[in-house]
Image (cartoon, rainbow, N blue to C red):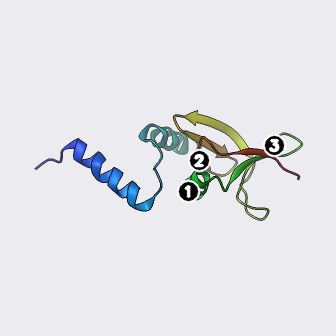
Amino acid sequence: MQKNPDQDSTESNAQNAQSGYRLPENNTLQHAAKLSIVEDKPIMMDYWTNSLDKTVLIGVKENKEKLLVKSEEEYTSPVSKIYKVGKEYIIVTENSIYLVDVEIPTKKISS
């Protein structure tokens, strides 16, 4: 017996409500997967929930270099490209691909 596609989205929404965090949109995940294959970089989700909580930011150094920042000790390699897809940013760094909420703050940081 096949599942009703509407039932899948209902189950998915129920799971999201339980965890309290929304998931990235399917379109964003598809674009990230394509980038991951083409650029041979892993997709990292460790900044996702923090971006929804607004506890991480895009830090901009004086030389205009951008980083994803969790704390003074925890941040990514420099950002090479940022794509906006729906409600999310796909952030490509030198080593990885990160998915974050589009409302993530941007702030000047010191080197």
One can see residue 42 in this view: no
The amino acid marked with disc number 3 is Glu
Q: Would you say 37 lies left or right of 71 here?
A: left
Q: Which residue is mark 3?
A: 65
- x, y percent for residue 62: 89, 43
The residue sitting at 63% across, 51% down in the picture is 96
Disc 3 element: loop
The amino acid marked with disc number 2 is Val
- x, y percent for residue 13: 35, 50
- In the current view of this chain or complex, which residue is farthest to the left? 1
- In the current view of this chain or complex, which residue is farthest to the bottom? 73
The numbered mark, 2 or 1, whose residue comes first in the sequence reads: 1
Question: Can you say whether 70 is above or below 98 in the image?
Answer: below
- Of circles 3 and 1, the one toward us is 1
The crowding category of the residue bearing disc 1, from other C-alpha atoms within 10 Å (few below 14, some 14 to 19, many at least 20), is some
The residue sitting at 78% across, 45% down in the picture is 107
What's the CA distance linking mark 2 and mark 1? 8 Å
What's the CA distance linking mark 3 and mark 2? 18 Å
- Of circles 3 and 2, the one toward us is 2
The residue sitting at 73% across, 58% down in the picture is 75
The numbered mark, 3 or 1, whose residue comes first in the sequence reads: 1
Q: Which residue is mark 2?
A: 100
Query: Looking at the rendering, which quadrant does residue 80 occupy?
Result: top right
Query: Looking at the rendering, which quadrant does residue 74 occupy?
Result: bottom right
Q: Which residue is mark 1?
A: 49
